[in-house]
């Protein structure tokens, strides 16, 4: 059973998501939060698999709520998905940077919402690499106060090469083709890079590739 927490200041939005999610045999909504502070409290208390988090909420916005949930040891396995009104929200890049596993547009098709929740619960990034790349290309150069470049000293030459390709939006199969290795080998390299860099998922790995300067907006467009 996939346990989901809803965080949105609009009761109708929460009700709509809840009706859709609770109708699924494999999904259970364990709580609703009307603001970010309540989202953090409920996430810590219920430890859901997935939090659907609105970015703009009173008391504590979704960005800070995501940051606090990700930093909470009890929530190490909790995955946060940002809910946005527009598909390229100015805060989404920062949310991915602090640990969100992807984002959903609020008017997404029900089937896509369900598919996304299940994918994130399974440990995948919600966004396809290509969509993630377009998002980051749009906002990476405008993100406020970017951190110092992330050190890549722990990565092997091949892992650094793989990280660059992940940042460019390539899937594991595409990486395998480009490097002339098996998809399983490509997946192993990606997993090792994630582990060494402390990335929660593939979406955050793409952010790291940009922060480290391995990829620039528009590269391999």
Image (cartoon, rainbow, N blue to C red):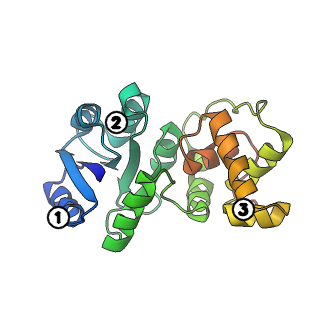
Name the mark on residue 65. Answer: 2
Kind of element beneath mark 2: helix
The mark lying in front, picked from 2 and 1, is 1
Apparent side of residue 165 relative to residue 202 in the rendered image (left or right): right
Q: Quadrant of the C terminus?
A: bottom right
Tell me how far mark 2 sits from mark 3, CA to CA.
36 Å
For label 2, the crowd category at 10 Å Cα-Cα, with few meaning under 14, some 14 to 19 and many 20 or more, is: many
Quadrant for residue 11, please give it.
bottom left
For label 3, the crowd category at 10 Å Cα-Cα, with few meaning under 14, some 14 to 19 and many 20 or more, is: some
Name the mark on residue 123. Answer: none
Q: Nearer the viewer, residue 160 or 95?
A: 160
Is label 3 in contact with label 1 (beta carbons under 8 Å)?
no
Q: At which x and y percent is residue 211?
A: 67, 40
Residue at x 75% of width, y 54% of height: 185
Residue at x 79% of width, y 44% of height: 160
Q: At which x and y percent is residue 48?
A: 30, 43
Q: Nearer the viewer, residue 71 or 67?
A: 71
The mark lying in front, picked from 2 and 3, is 3
Q: At which x and y percent is residue 90?
A: 47, 51
Residue at mark 3:
183
Mark 2 or 3 closer to N-term?
2
For label 1, the crowd category at 10 Å Cα-Cα, with few meaning under 14, some 14 to 19 and many 20 or more, is: few
Residue at mark 1:
19
Kind of element beneath mark 1: helix
Apparent side of residue 152 relative to residue 100 in the rendered image (left or right): right
Quadrant for residue 62, please give it.
top left
Q: Nearer the viewer, residue 58 or 158?
A: 158
Toward the top, the furthest residue is 73
Residue at x 62% of width, y 45% of height: 205
Q: Nearer the viewer, residue 64 or 178?
A: 178
The mark lying in front, picked from 3 and 1, is 3
């Amino acid at each position: 059973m996939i346990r989901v927490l809803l965080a949105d200041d609009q009761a109708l939005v929460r009700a709509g998501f809840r009706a859709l999610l609770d109708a699924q045999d494999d999904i259970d909504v364990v709580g609703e939060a009307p603001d970010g502070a309540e989202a953090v409290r409920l996430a810590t208390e219920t430890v859901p698999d997935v939090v659907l988090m609105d970015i703009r909420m009173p008391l504590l916005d979704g960005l800070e709520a995501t940051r606090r949930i990700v930093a909470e040891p009890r929530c190490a396995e909790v995955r946060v998905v940002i809910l946005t009104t527009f598909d390229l929200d100015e805060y989404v890049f920062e949310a991915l940077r602090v640990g969100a596993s992807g984002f959903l547009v609020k008017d997404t098709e029900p089937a896509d919402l369900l598919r996304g929740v299940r994918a994130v619960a399974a440990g995948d990034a919600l966004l396809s690499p290509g969509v993630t790349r377009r998002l980051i290309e749009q906002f990476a150069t405008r993100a406020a106060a970017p951190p110092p470049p992330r050190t890549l000293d722990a990565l092997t030459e091949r892992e650094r090469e793989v990280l660059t390709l992940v940042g460019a939006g390539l899937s594991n199969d595409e990486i395998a083709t480009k490097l002339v290795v098996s998809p399983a080998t490509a997946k192993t390299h990606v997993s090792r890079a994630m582990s060494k860099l402390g990335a929660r998922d593939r979406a955050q790995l793409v952010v790291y590739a940009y922060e480290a300067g391995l990829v620039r907006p528009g590269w391999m467009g």
